[in-house]
Image (tube, coloured by chain):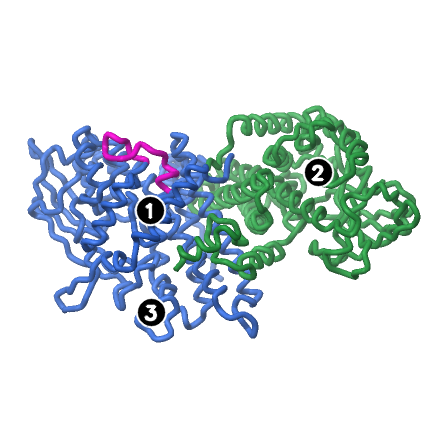
Chain colours: A blue, B green
């Protein structure tokens, strides 16, 4: 048990901070996610960075700070997971995402062929290649294994037909990490495969879906700030056999393991706790006395409560890191973190609305908006973190069944119905009338 | 950074668990609820044979001088077994004597604690529910080579079992505040002491203790005359973090009982544990207890490392208060009617965890301390860096937040 970073890790953090102070200037940050006019002429984030950001990533790469925990032979540094976490945390705090969360890299490393690893991982680390996630479909969200998108074997490859939804970043990603059905004749989890497909493959169409963060645009610092996601359509998309990740029909296991690793890390952690720091620091900056919010006992109690909850977010992240660092696997710890942290983020977001009152409804372009409207924009998206990457309800199922060994409802129902077929059916209990 | 137990720590925990599973039955727990001393002397002696009382005491007095984290692991198992042992009050007071007692006092008390011959406790609270120095009114007045104590203490753990008690008294002119407080080690059989047992939900031993012209030799002063508050505060913070481990151990065992029950109990033709509503209650219980454990062991670890720890202790206690209470309440609900029955054991855990949430600082009291550190001290806060903000990180945090 050791609740601190090593001196070497602390030194790394200082080094990264010094670099950030020098190189991550407002001009560089203005080059993030450049705006581009859409058909109506309105400006929208394009997902593309300008040349200053590209230069920044190159400079960060030259320091050896990209993909620290990835093996050297695939373009990483062969370092430890915690050092990677520290560097990612510092850059994310400065507004620059250098992490590989949701990138597909963990899955490719775990299940890819040697050729796939050698091609994809160095490029993912250098950010020359990026994936959008092609999992969810209109009829398969929480029940992902119910997906319909078909990849039909053709002998030398596959032909893909179907629709994906909430493919965030599909409009700028170079590749899609696609989950599709390769065998419709077997139980649903057993006929699924994963494909790595370039987005410029003929037959792929991307259509924007605008979120409620879109008008006016959320400030960069918004925790839950995606203005755009997409629908992605596949019409007779032909891919070679080499596009397959892992074995055919074994895609469910490949995806599950990678999703678990994607749920933890600096990105998820900061998303959950940034607003706790913000509200405390904002309260401290206001003049004291005469009805100051920082002197209100109810506000003080709530802020201390949220701060404590945020510490649990931090410590659960550290627990996940400790497990990964020891080379272990999650039983339920990743799922537990994915319940606690997003729900905490929501509690903080909502508590802030009641601390700031009507100021917390003022969006980015409004007069009197606090901190560019970040608190108001957060209200519009915080609940989303309890839904994406596996809803908190699914995560609780996983804690209960994998962690605590509670029975699957489906199996219990099946057992109950086979038992009751032998005996007269029991009438359903009448609904309470009050 | 590795927040998991290492091998040695796992061994200590497993050994304590195995010992108590063998020695501490719920029958014994029930017997001690009506016992006038409220603890099992045989079990106490065996605990001493295992070295529990001396786990964190200095080696020169026969202790093992291990970090507090180890004591936390043992007390977590004591909580799991809800073992009727006056361990927390004894080690809490003994550690304060080890911190601040004179050499003569340490040499007299600590070996006797290590061997299990002497049981200790402390008496700080008075009429106020909260442990505030402002509310300490009991006086100790110098008279020759002694001090004469007058006043009334409340919520004194294990006073009926204890041989000696650390009593927080006002020795200075100030009527309240942190200054002018002193700590004395008083024999519980000194003339002038009247004890009245409280009847608690935990059915453990807590007392009101009235001191009427109780004479204690000046040599029994622990720490500096008039400057006792830092010693008292440290004792209470340490005890508070250790009480959290006890609560967590009990709450986890209680949750496990509910989870086992949910797997076995059938309704509507299936185990109730197959209903998602029940599964999600169970998942929450484990998430809460895990969270409390992480906070608590971080606080203990920081004490061991000599780092600031008060905010961490308050985080742990305020969180454990709410979440352990909610967890044992969930366990009662999952059990339905049977959990309310005297003959069924579940309430043994429920009643204790519930009582422990009210001791050594309520949720509101601890949050007030956190809020003070967050809001009333200078500097930009950053999660993962100490609060109050340490001088060396003030600029760095501000630059980052800008």
Q: Which residues are magenta?
A: A69-85
**Marks 3 and 1 share the same chain:** yes
Quarter of the figure with residue A417:
top left
Circles 2 and 1 in contact, beta carbons < 8 Å: no
Disc 1 designates what residue? A390
Q: Nearer the viewer, residue B111 or B196?
A: B111
- Give the label, 3 or 1, closer to the camera: 3
Chain identifier of the residue bearing label 3 in the image: A
Q: Position of residue B159 (x, y in %)?
A: 79, 42
Please, what secondary structure does the residue beneath circle 2 have? helix
Furthest-top residue in view? B49
- On residue B212, the disc is none
- Binning the other alpha carbons within 10 Å of mark 3 as few (below 14), some (14 to 19) or many (20 upward) gives many
Chain identifier of the residue bearing label 2 in the image: B
Q: Is residue A167 visible?
A: no
Q: Position of residue A186 (x, y in %)?
A: 21, 34
Q: Nearer the viewer, residue A38 or B306?
A: B306
Horizontal side, residue A213 vs residue A284: left or right: left
Q: CA distance from mark 2 to mark 1?
A: 47 Å
At 35% from the left edge and 40% from the top edge, which residue is drawn? A84
- On residue A363, the disc is 3
Disc 2 designates what residue? B95
Q: Position of residue B89 (x, y in %)?
A: 72, 40
- Binning the other alpha carbons within 10 Å of mark 2 as few (below 14), some (14 to 19) or many (20 upward) gives many
At 63% from the left edge and 56% from the top edge, which residue is drawn? B365
Q: CA distance from mark 3 to mark 1?
A: 29 Å
Q: Nearer the viewer, residue B133 or B400?
A: B400
Q: Is residue B174 magenta?
A: no
């Amino acid at each position: 048990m050791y609740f601190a970073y090593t001196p070497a890790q602390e030194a790394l953090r200082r080094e990264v901070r010094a670099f950030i102070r020098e190189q991550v200037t407002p001009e560089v940050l203005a080059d993030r996610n450049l705006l581009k006019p859409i058909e109506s002429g309105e400006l929208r984030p394009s997902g593309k960075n300008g040349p200053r950001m590209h230069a920044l990533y190159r400079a960060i790469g030259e320091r050896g700070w990209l993909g620290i925990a990835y093996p050297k032979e695939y373009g990483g540094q062969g370092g430890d997971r915690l050092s990677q976490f520290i560097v990612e945390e510092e850059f994310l705090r400065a507004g620059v995402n250098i992490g590989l969360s949701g990138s597909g890299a963990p899955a490719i490393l775990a299940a890819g062929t040697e050729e796939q690893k050698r091609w994809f991982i160095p490029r993912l680390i250098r950010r020359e290649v990026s994936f959008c996630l092609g999992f969810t479909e209109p009829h398969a969200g929480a029940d992902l294994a119910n997906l319909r998108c078909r990849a039909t074997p053709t002998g030398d490859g596959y032909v893909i037909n179907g629709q994906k939804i909430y493919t965030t970043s599909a409009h700028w990603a170079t590749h899609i990490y696609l989950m599709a059905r390769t065998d419709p004749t077997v139980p649903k989890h057993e006929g699924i495969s994963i494909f790595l497909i370039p987005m410029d493959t003929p037959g792929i169409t991307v259509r924007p879906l605008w979120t409620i963060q879109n008008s006016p645009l959320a400030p960069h610092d918004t925790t839950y700030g995606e203005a755009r996601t997409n629908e992605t359509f596949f019409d007779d998309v032909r891919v070679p056999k080499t596009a397959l990740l892992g074995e055919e029909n074994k895609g469910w296991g490949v995806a599950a393991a990678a999703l678990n690793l994607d749920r933890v890390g600096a990105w998820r952690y900061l998303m959950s706790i940034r607003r706790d720091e913000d509200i405390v620091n904002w309260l401290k900056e206001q003049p004291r006395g005469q009805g100051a919010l920082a002197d209100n006992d109810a506000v003080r109690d709530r802020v201390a409560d949220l701060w404590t909850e945020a510490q649990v977010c931090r410590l659960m992240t550290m627990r996940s890191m400790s497990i990964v660092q020891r080379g272990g696997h999650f039983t339920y710890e990743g799922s537990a973190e994915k319940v606690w942290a997003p729900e905490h983020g929501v509690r903080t977001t909502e508590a802030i609305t009641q601390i700031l009152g009507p100021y917390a409804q003022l969006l980015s372009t409004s007069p009197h908006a606090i901190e560019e409207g970040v608190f108001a924009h957060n209200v519009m998206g915080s609940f989303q973190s309890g839904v994406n990457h596996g809803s908190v309800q699914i995560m609780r199922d996983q804690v209960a069944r994998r962690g605590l060994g509670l029975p699957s409802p489906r199996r219990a129902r099946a057992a109950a119905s086979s038992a009751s077929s032998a005996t007269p059916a029991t009438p359903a209990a009448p609904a309470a009338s009050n | 950074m590795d927040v998991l137990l290492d091998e040695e720590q796992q061994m200590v925990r497993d050994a304590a668990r195995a010992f108590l599973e063998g020695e501490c039955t719920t029958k014994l727990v029930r017997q001690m609820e009506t016992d006038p001393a409220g603890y099992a002397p045989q079990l106490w002696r065996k605990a001493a044979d295992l070295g529990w009382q001396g786990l964190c005491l200095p080696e020169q007095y026969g202790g093992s001088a291990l970090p507090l984290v180890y004591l936390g692991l043992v007390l977590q198992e004591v909580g799991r077994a809800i073992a009727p042992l006056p361990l927390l009050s004894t080690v809490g007071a003994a550690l304060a004597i080890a911190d601040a007692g004179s050499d003569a006092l340490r040499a007299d008390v600590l070996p006797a604690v290590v061997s299990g011959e002497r049981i200790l406790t402390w008496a700080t609270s008075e009429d106020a529910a909260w442990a505030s120095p402002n509310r300490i009114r009991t006086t100790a007045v110098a008279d020759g080579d002694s001090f004469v104590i007058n006043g009334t203490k409340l919520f004194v753990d294990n006073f009926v079992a204890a041989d000696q008690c650390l009593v927080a008294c006002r020795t200075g002119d100030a009527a309240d505040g942190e200054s002018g407080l002193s700590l004395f080690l008083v024999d519980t059989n000194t003339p002038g002491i009247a004890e009245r047992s409280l009847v608690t939900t935990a059915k453990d031993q807590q007392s009101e203790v009235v001191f009427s012209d109780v004479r204690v030799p000046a040599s029994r002063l622990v720490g500096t005359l008039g400057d006792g508050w830092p010693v008292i505060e440290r004792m209470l913070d340490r005890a508070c973090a250790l009480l959290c481990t006890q609560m967590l151990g009990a709450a986890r065992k209680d949750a496990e009982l509910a989870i086992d029950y949910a797997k076995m109990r059938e309704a509507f033709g299936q185990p109730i544990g197959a209903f998602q509503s029940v599964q999600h209650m169970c998942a929450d219980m484990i998430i809460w207890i895990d969270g409390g454990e992480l906070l608590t062991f971080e606080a203990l670890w920081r004490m061991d490392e000599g780092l600031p720890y008060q905010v961490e202790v308050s985080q742990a206690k305020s969180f454990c208060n709410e979440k352990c209470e909610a967890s044992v309440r969930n366990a009662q609900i999952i059990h339905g009617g049977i959990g309310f029955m005297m003959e069924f054991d579940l309430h043994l855990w429920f009643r204790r965890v519930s009582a422990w949430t009210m001791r050594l600082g309520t949720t509101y009291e601890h949050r007030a301390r956190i809020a003070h550190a967050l809001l009333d001290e200078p500097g930009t806060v950053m999660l993962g860096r100490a609060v109050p903000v340490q001088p060396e990180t003030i600029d760095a945090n501000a630059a980052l937040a800008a």
